[in-house]
Image (cartoon, rainbow, N blue to C red):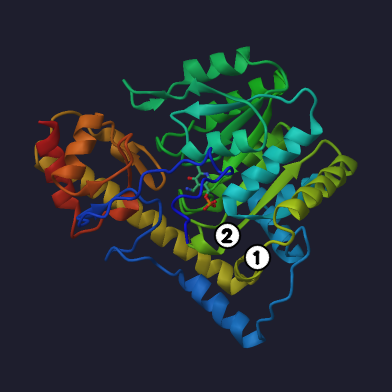
Amino acid sequence: MGSETHKSTFFTGAQRIPPDHDSPVKANLGQGAYRDGDGNPWILPSVRESRRLLQEQGLIHEYLPILGHAGFREAVARTVLGEELFSTKGSHVATCQSLSGTGALHLAGKLIARTNSPKPKVIITDPPYGNHFQVIKDVGLEYETFKYYDAATKSVDMASYRNMLQTVPPGSVILLHACAHNPTGCDPNKDEWREIGQIMKSRNLFPIFDAAYLGFNSGSVDEDAFSIRHFIGELNLEAAICVSYAKSMGLYGERVGAVLVHAASKDLALDCQSMLEQIQRSQVSNPPAFGAKTAHLILTDEKLKKQWSEDLLTMSGRIRTMRQKLYDALHEEGAPGTWEHLINQTGMFGFLGLSSQVVVELREKYHIYMADNSRISVAGLNDSNVKYVAASIAASVR
Ligand code: PMP
């Protein structure tokens, strides 16, 4: 009633973001979620069994503690650090359950913002995972970017990386992708990680590991956690690790994650954990229970853990196969240019390296959707669409 003429004095700064496309979808390669060979979401057999067991035990819906499910928090630390490192460093690690990886980044960011004066700058890769900017701004920290990717060689620009590490102010925070860099799919190799860690230690830089793809990348958590374990185990660096089970367990909507903080002493770890508890209290009070219980069983029951390892191989293997199939199909179509980068990249995303004009043409003419920077979710490819996608790319780049 009269609402159209009513002038609000609030919300005048509210802005809309453009709506999603609603055209007929031929290939949706934009969304970062795993799809099976038929293009459908996949419930991991380990998750299905865990849910069944939970139901059988009788699910209750009480609040979790503010820090989250204690068994889950410990299981995450054991899994990410590995049993050996956990036995020596576990007591120096604060843990707090989070609203998936995004929530973990928030908790880590807030903890850093509240415990440092002056507040350090956060260094983000360019190209970035877009939400890093928003989260870092939101927690009250400033950021800068550095050139991470060399478009000519389609690989990590180590010269630029080194230069950044050697010139940022001591105490700066470096936001690292533990594995499967989003969006480029290009990671430092093990020697490069060792070098990055060494410089960070000598220059007193603080790593936040965004660990959204542990196990999902190679099929092995141990392999994907190399950078984290090296920094903590070999270099004894303080660090925050933001863990997500969205991709690796397919628990996207359940918001299952945790932040781990490796501190220089047991006492400091307890202080950090108390800070995390205070931050969590004001943000969400208590984290959600169902996903954490589901993940906890998977991480602690030997049979379920084994099944999860197989599930990780199923997902990472299918993605690797689709990379190869896209590469082969582009060759068969005679698409101009080199495409080796597609099989050299790792993780869910393929960074095609197409111009924005080509991305628009693929969208408007062929109804193939991808991020504006030509990042595709390789998981969106399957035997029914990969040839169509390759033929459309070939026609558009000609
Ligand atoms: N970091 C990176 C690099 C990601 O790709 C994602 C998932 N798109 C996330 C964090 C967080 O995702 P979630 O909050 O769903 O765990």
Residue 216 visible in the snapshot:
yes
In the depicted structure, whether residue 15 falls above or below residue 143: below
Q: Give the quarter of the image for residue 294.
A: bottom right
Residue occupying the far right of the picture = 267
Q: Amino acid at mark 2?
A: Arg
The secondary structure type at the circle numbered 1 is loop
Tell me if 93 is positioned left or right of 329 in this view: right
Tell me if 393 is positioned left or right of 203 in this view: left
Residue at image location 33% in from the left, 50% down from the top: 20
Give whichever of discs 1 and 2 has the lower sequence position: 2
Q: Nearer the viewer, residue 285 or 242?
A: 285
Residue 188, given in percent of the width and then of the height, sits at 49, 31
Q: Which mark is residue 15?
A: none
Q: Residues within 10 Å of mark 1 (few under 14, many from 20)?
A: many
The residue indicated by pointer 1 is: 288
Does the CB distance between marks 1 and 2 fall below 8 Å? yes
Residue 266, given in percent of the width and then of the height, sits at 87, 44
Q: Which mark is residue 255?
A: 2
